[in-house]
Amino acid sequence: GRHVSGPALPSDLQLSPDGHLAHYVAQPSKWPAEAIVGTLDIESMTASAHAIAIPANHPFPDPNGSLSGSEYFYIGDHVTWSTLTPDGRYLIINYWDQASIIVADLAERASWIVPLPGFIKPPSHLPLNGHAVGGVAINHTPGDNHGLLAVHGLSQIGVFALSADARSVERRSLTAVNPPITFARGRIFGPDGNSNRVAPIAWSEDGQHIIAAGEAVGPVDVQSWRVEDAGRQMADRQIYTACDAGEMNIINDIFTFNGLEPPPTPTATRTDDPTQ
């Protein structure tokens, strides 16, 4: 693989369709480390191809990485998400503060940037205007929504159709939401500087619904919509409260069996009572 200058942290990981490879995104934890996409052979746990250089998600605001006012630094693995196309060819990564996605071609070992129509850039790496590119998820379930890309934009949920060569996207719908993060004392994630992953999103197991992180504070921890007309409409919003403590909601991830075979139902077995 290629040399990576400085430390980098694995931030997200996707398995190949056959389960033999693990594609991971590593984000810099210290200036001037680079962001990469790497591929591991799971059986040997060794690199199966050279790393792909990609733009860093939220690098240090300055070479010294100092904390100053609203320039509170949080490392890129807190805001990095990825999703794999159904054919396993392309890894899609959110580009946090550029209203875009990053595409890594896992066959040609190259990368490029694709703008998201309708998304708005934040004024800096801190999304003070309530806009950034958070979680990304591609629907792997057959049907009208197959292959559609869902994106959590903090203040909106976007649904896009990715072109066959992953060089462009078509906007299908944008749905306004309240952001799942907040700021206090110039910091993200609340007054104590809590650092957790931001704005996850997922497709339901049947591929008919989008599930996303809810609002920063209040009863809407998680929300979902039924996706209609091949992504052109989001309907029947449902809200879910995971914790009624009334404090900040921090949803780290959302897991579903979209595109996966559910595990078999365990078979009841008899176990002898050791006391007899």
Image (spheres, rainbow, N blue to C red):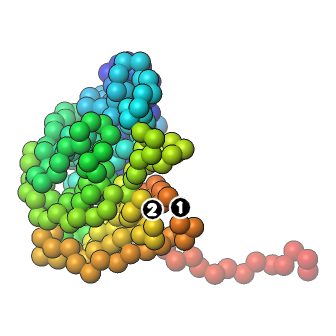
x then y, percent, for residue 147: 19, 62
Provide the residue designation for mark 1.
247
x then y, percent, for residue 249: 48, 60
Which quadrant of the structure image shows residue 261? bottom left
Q: Secondary structure at mark 1?
A: loop
x then y, percent, for residue 257: 39, 67
Q: Amino acid at mark 1?
A: Glu
Circles 2, 1 touching at the beta carbon (< 8 Å): yes
Task: Give above or below for 275 relative to 53.
Answer: below
Q: Amino acid at mark 2?
A: Val
Task: Give above or below for 207 relative to 255.
Answer: below
Identify the image quadrant of the N terminus: top left
Provide the residue designation for mark 2.
217
x then y, percent, for residue 79: 37, 44
Q: Secondary structure at mark 2?
A: loop
Q: Is residue 241 left or right of residue 233?
A: right
Which quadrant of the structure image shows residue 32? top left
Do we see residue 265 in this rendering? yes
Residue at horizontal 30 percent and vertical 44 percent from the top:
127
Task: Give above or below for 215 relative to 22.
Answer: below
Give the mark nearer the N terminus: 2 vs 1.
2
Q: Is residue 70 left or right of residue 249?
A: left
Which residue occupies the foreground of this view, 43 or 50? 50
What is the C-alpha distance between the residues marked 2 and 1? 6 Å
Q: Is residue 207 left or right of residue 8?
A: left
Count the marks.
2
Residue at horizontal 34 percent and vertical 27 percent from the top:
61
Residue at horizontal 45 percent and vertical 27 percent from the top:
67
Disc sitting over residue 106 in the figure: none
- Structural crowding at the residue carrying mark 1, measured as other residues with C-alpha within 10 Å and reported as few (<14), some (14–19) or many (≥20): few
